[in-house]
Amino acid sequence: MNPSAWWLLNLTLVAALAAGPLARAQDTESEEEVVEEILAKVNEEIITRSELMEKVAPFKAELAQRLQPSELSARIKELESRLLEEEIVRRLLLDRARQRGLTVPQDAIDNAVKRIMDENQISDMDRLDRTLQQMGSSLSKLQSMLREDYLTNQVIQYEVMGSVVVSESELQEYYQQHADEFQIPERVRLRQILIAGSNEGAMLTATELRDRLRQGADFQQLASQYSDAPSRDKGGDEGLFERGELDPALEAVAFSLAAGSVSEVIQSKNGYHILYIIDRTGGGKRSFEDAKLDIQRKVQEQKIGKARREYVDKLKRENYVEITGDIKPAALPD
């Protein structure tokens, strides 16, 4: 299955299975009574309140643990709206899959189940089935849901993604209009000798070490012998830094020196420093050819999102969809 087509994976499954080892989602309101009500009609099918609440329950329990009561009600309403839209779209896509005569290879379902077991550290099918039953589900229900997800993804693959083409001119245009995205951060890799303290003795020690470096002494050896920084065990190697990551006093000097240069003694709140610039990188812009694959992915994702929205709107126009309940569907994210 094409991973980029996996956009309508059932959100209830994700909530129940993806948050670590499988565990039963408990609703905060025990034995909450759900009034049977038709929320929407999609062609010959109906979506009832109880069906929607079954999908909402795992999310509701998780949200209740994270949110304050004042936030919970609004978030649950948003969730109900989003899941209702998802269910409407899912049924439209399944109808379209039936019209196209699409089928599901058994190995696709077997692989999806195995992936769920691996991600949740479940070793055998019996344990998976028992765990699902504890959640009020079953292995057969999971497999049925995975079949439906496969079919909806195939519809999107055939009728949306197959028509999305990204031209060279579109890639060039994105590159020109998003220049900031392709700036390479300026970095320096450096060693330092730190003599801690603010007294005259610390300053004299640092000055003496700088004089020895002028006379050809090895920076790494001096750092290992005299530096008070933890990096002394690595010959003073502090690693890579971008602008904004160093003490301002050190940064001003570090980014002004060429690779292979040794600074003068620099005073900071931590003491007296001597820097050696191992290497400098970045500071330019990625070439179009270097960035081309990244640009193609971004532009393609944008075009697929737009085509997907238009396709769903087209399905709604061409099929019978009626909202009959008090929950209004909210558009799904791209």
Image (cartoon, rainbow, N blue to C red):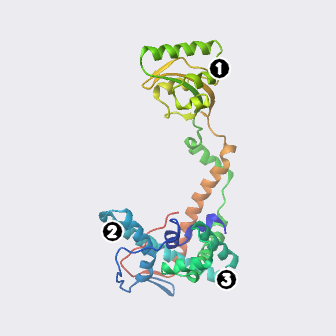
Report the residue marked by disc 3.
101
The x, y position of residue 132, in whole percent, is: 53, 78
Judged left or right of residue 74, residue 202 is right
Q: Tell me if residue 162 comes above or below residue 138 in the rendering.
A: above
Crowd class of label 1 (few under 14; some 14 to 19; many from 20; radius 10 Å)? few
Q: Nearer the viewer, mark 3 or mark 1?
A: 1
Q: Residues within 10 Å of mark 2 (few under 14, many from 20)?
A: some
Q: Earlier in the sequence, mark 1 or mark 2?
A: 2
Amino acid at the residue labelled 2: Ser
Res. 211 in view: yes
The alpha-carbon separation of the residues under discs 3 and 1 comes to 75 Å
Identify the residue under disc 2.
73
Across and down, in percent, residue 35 comes to 35, 85
Q: CA distance from mark 3 to mark 2?
A: 42 Å
Residue position marked by numbered label 1 in the rendering: 218
Q: Nearer the viewer, residue 316 or 150?
A: 150
The residue that appears at 63% across and 65% down in the rendered structure is 3
Q: What amino acid type should be assigned to the residue bearing mark 3?
A: Gly
Residue 258 image position (x, y, % from top left): 62, 23
Closer to the N terminus: mark 3 or mark 1?
Answer: 3
Front label number (3 vs 2):
2
Q: How far apart are the two marked residues, 1 and 2, measured between alpha carbons?
A: 66 Å
Q: Of callouts 3 and 2, which one flags the residue occurring earlier in the amino acid sequence?
A: 2
Amino acid at the residue labelled 1:
Asp
Task: Tell me where residue 108 sits by quadrant.
Answer: bottom right
Residue drawn at 66 percent across, 72 percent down = 111
> Mark 1 or mark 2, which is nearer to you?
1
Near-viewer residue (149 or 97): 149
